[in-house]
Image (cartoon, rainbow, N blue to C red):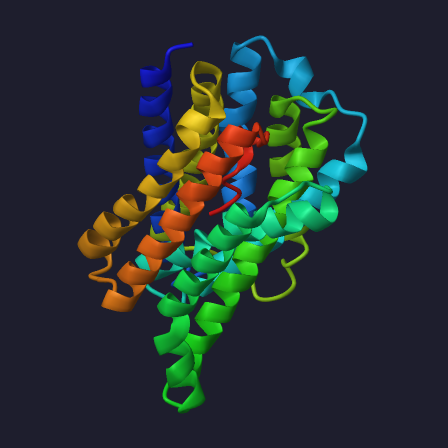
Amino acid sequence: MTPFRGIALKLLSVALFAVMVACVKAARMTVPAGEAVFFRAFIALIPVTLWAIASGQGTRALSTSNFRGHFWRGAVGASAMMLSFAALGFLPLPELTAIGFSAPLMTTILAVFLLGETVRIYRWTAVVVGLFGVLVMIWPRLTELQNGISAADGTGVLLGLASAGLMALAVIHVRWLSRSESTLAIVFWFHVSCSAVALVSLPFGWVWPDLTTWALLIGAGIFGGVAQILLTISYRMADASTLSPFDYSMMLYSLLIAWILFEETPTTEVMLGAGIVIGAGLYILMRERRLGVTRPAPLRRNTP
């Protein structure tokens, strides 16, 4: 393995995912969330398919015996993206990114009930601490909602948390699928099923984009597809336990993009809560590495 190249590719893939989210956030000023999800997934099929053919793995991408499993994984992933893209209309980018970091905590909880994994007191403690960090982040928003100041703030928080929960469920689906399906097949059929599910929202308010929005939607799909390819390659060069902590570099990219493009700055509560959540997530990763818990690493990022 070549871990340093793997780390470099992982950081680049996360950066491209951050750019993808920025494209979606800008496009969301014109198009609804379901339409954004469709283009993000459908356009991403172009680089994913070209890469599969160029690497001589086109047959592997199409080969599957579990269409039902891929459909449900796509349905959950599409729903998570729709909620996350909808939340972009209510919350600053760094805040939504920080809330999304609660997904690994929820994955740990779901793995106990759905996969029968054993979680000991140390990881349970980290989950509780991480969820406290989430509460620190969202408390000002919930206080405003309670006082009737801004219902939009509370709506954004609820959408973000629901998206994180569905992201966690998508990871559980991937863990289950990875027992019998190749990584390439999971990537390919995710984009196919996600596109099909998002297309259902067509009668509910899709609009014809202008040239700028077309560019943003196409860019979101291309950046997302290329990021997925780089992510998959990176996990061929280094262990998942080595690369997984670099998921949290998304926070740095989000802060920079939000500041430059959207003039958004996070509050003290968001930064403090994000630090607690990231610390808890890193501790869980460390414990899982010690205990040999396997992860479907190339597919952990379902979203945005």
Residue 3 to residue 164: above or below: above
Q: Quadrant of residue 237?
A: top left
Q: Residue at x 67, y 16 (%)?
A: 60
Give the image location of residue 128, x and y in percent.
50, 59
Q: Residue at x 43, y 64 (%)?
A: 132
Give the image location of residue 222, x and y in percent.
43, 34
Asked whether residue 140 appears in the rendered view, the answer is yes
- 70 or 282: nearer the eye? 282
Q: Residue at x 56, y 23 (%)?
A: 49
Q: Is residue 11 left or right of residue 68?
A: left
The extreme front residue here reads: 121
Residue 246 to residue 37: above or below: above
Q: Is residue 131 left or right of residue 257?
A: right
Residue 226 to residue 164: above or below: above
Give the image location of residue 204, x and y in percent.
62, 66
Q: Quadrant of residue 1?
A: top left
Number of callouts: 0
- 216 or 173: nearer the eye? 173
The extreme bottom residue here reads: 147
